[in-house]
Amino acid sequence: MCRVKPKVNVLMCYNCLEMGHHSDICRAAKHEKKCLNCTQIGHISKDCSKRSYCATCDREGHRTDSYICPAHKRRVQEETSRILREVRKENRNDEQDEDTDMTNALGGGNNMRLND
């Protein structure tokens, strides 16, 4: 048997650089869009010459959208665990539904005994 792990994409807003939502529903003002590289307002990452800084973990050395960010890794692990719990719960519910269907198909619980 092989193990399958779900692919997890953590939502990140490219407007305010926070996790959990996309930029189309961001509450931050659109004119305050932050640089993905240094997190400052007023320029975009391709024009940035500053050192990389992560708004998620408050550390230098990587961008906010970097997969090496410890906070991002933790968030992915949490989301993966949540998804696996949901899948297991759905599988248990499906098994219970199958058991109920099989019992009903066999007439279990609804059998009426006739006098011989």
Image: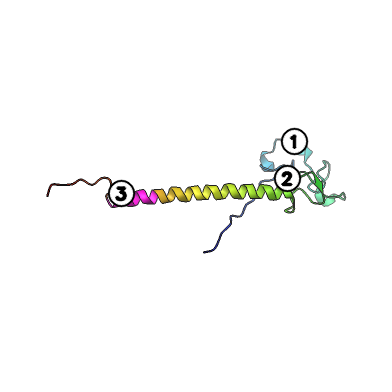
Secondary structure under tag 3 reads helix
Q: Which residue is identified by label 3?
A: 104
At label 2, which amino acid type do we have?
Tyr
Residue holding disc 1 = 29
Element on which disc 1 rests: loop
What x and y, as percent, mark residue 58?
79, 43
Badge 1 crowding class, 10 Å Cα cut-off, few under 14, some 14 to 19, many 20 or more, is few
Q: Is residue 4 above or below residue 32?
A: below
Image side of residue 91 versus residue 71, left or right: left
Measured in 3D between alpha carbons, the distance from the residue under mark 3 to the one under mark 2, in whole angstroms, is: 52 Å
Asked where in the image residue 24 lies, by quadrant, the reply is top right
Q: Amino acid at mark 3?
A: Asn
Nearer the camera: disc 3 or disc 2: 3
Residue range (magenta): 97-106
Query: Which residue is more in the foreground, 79 or 63?
Result: 79
Q: Furthest-front residue in view?
A: 116
Q: Are marks 2 and 1 in contact (CB under 8 Å)?
A: no
Going from the N terminus, do you reach mark 2 or mark 1 first?
A: 2
> Depth-wise, is mark 3 or mark 1 nearer the camera?
3
Whether residue 1 is situated above or below residue 18 in the rendered picture: below
Residue carrying label 2: 14
The location of residue 99, given as percent across then percent down, is: 37, 51
C-alpha distance separating marks 2 and 1: 12 Å
Q: Is residue 37 left or right of residue 83?
A: right
